[in-house]
Image (spheres, helix red, strand yellow):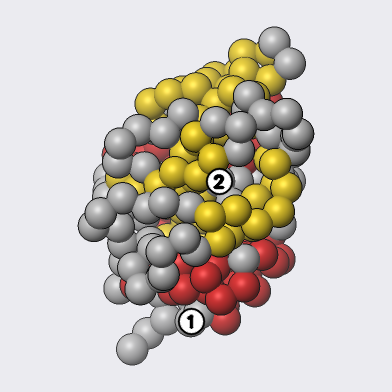
């Protein structure tokens, strides 16, 4: 069986190589690229991201990635956002009073967590909804690795974690998936989640 082709979008942000290595370990044929034709053609597109929402959106826009991500979502082609790569999928990011439009393929706003200690950094449990694909085969109260101060409010269909308040730890909207945590830094559970996502590309 041919390995699924995965493109990790290079727009100047994110743990590109660690995401690449983690996906390769679970059987993907991975390319880190800013080439839009490759991003369009891949079986799956990964949108990584670290740092500020506004900076990530600026980087995505600068390489022309916004149109490709929206196009893939509209056509039902798989996309996986990671950390700030998840956040930019929402309508809006509000950081330090600066409101930055996001990609708008997920409904909602990304705001600072109401928590006594920020960033939320380290291992935390998540509560997936029934029927999840990403978390299939993982035990209850499984832990993943988070590093963030901002997040979106969860909907009833989202995977939820809590740090000061409940927030969306992962979303699954058919071919559009995203995680607020870093699966590539989350050991065996992260590998299983990435393998599950890869399985949706076959």
Residue 55, by quadrant, is top right
Residue under the image location 50 percent in, 30 percent down:
152
Above-or-below relation of 38 to 106 = below
Q: Is mark 2 on a helix, strand or loop?
A: loop
| Residue 44 horizontal side relative to residue 173, left or right | right
According to the image, label 1 marks what residue?
A: 27
Instruction: Measure the C-alpha gap from mark 2 to mark 1.
Output: 23 Å
According to the image, label 2 marks what residue?
A: 180
The answer to whether the residues at label 2 and label 1 have Cβ atoms under 8 Å apart is: no
Q: Position of residue 178 (x, y in %)?
A: 46, 48
Residue 163 in sight here: yes
Q: Which quarter of the figure is the C terminus placed in?
A: bottom left
> Which sits earlier in the primary sequence, circle 2 or circle 1?
1
Camera-nearest label, 2 or 1: 2
Q: Which residue lies furthest to the left in this view?
A: 131
Residue under the image location 33 percent in, 68 percent down:
136
Q: Where is residue 120 in the image (x, y as percent from the top left)?
A: 70, 41
Residue under the image location 73 percent in, 29 percent down:
116
Q: Where is residue 30 in the image (x, y as percent from the top left)?
A: 55, 71
Q: How crowded is mark 2: few (under 14 residues within 10 Å), some or many (20 or more)?
A: many
| Residue 158 horizontal side relative to residue 189, left or right | left
Q: Is mark 1 on a helix, strand or loop?
A: loop
The residue lying toward the viewer, choosing from 98 and 28, is 98
The residue lying toward the viewer, choosing from 76 and 113, is 113
Above-or-below relation of 70 to 76 = above
Residue under the image location 54 percent in, 40 percent down:
162
């Amino acid at each position: 069986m041919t390995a699924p082709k995965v493109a990790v979008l290079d727009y100047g942000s994110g743990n590109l190589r660690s995401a690449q290595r983690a996906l390769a370990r679970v059987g993907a044929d991975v390319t880190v690229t800013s080439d839009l034709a490759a991003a369009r053609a891949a079986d799956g597109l990964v949108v990584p991201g670290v740092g500020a929402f506004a900076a990530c959106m600026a980087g995505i826009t600068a390489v022309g990635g916004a149109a490709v991500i929206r196009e893939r979502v509209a056509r039902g082609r798989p996309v996986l956002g990671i950390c700030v790569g998840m956040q930019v999928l929402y309508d809006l990011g509000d950081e330090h009073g600066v409101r930055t439009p996001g990609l708008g393929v997920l409904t909602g706003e990304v705001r600072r967590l109401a928590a006594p200690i920020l960033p939320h950094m380290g291992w935390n449990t998540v509560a997936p909804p029934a029927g999840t694909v990403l978390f299939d085969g993982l035990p209850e109260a499984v832990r993943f690795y988070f590093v963030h101060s901002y997040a979106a409010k969860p909907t009833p269909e989202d995977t939820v974690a809590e740090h000061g308040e409940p927030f969306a730890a992962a979303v699954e909207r058919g071919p559009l998936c995203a995680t607020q945590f870093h699966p590539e830094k989350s050991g065996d559970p992260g590998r299983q989640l990435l393998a599950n996502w890869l399985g949706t590309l076959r």
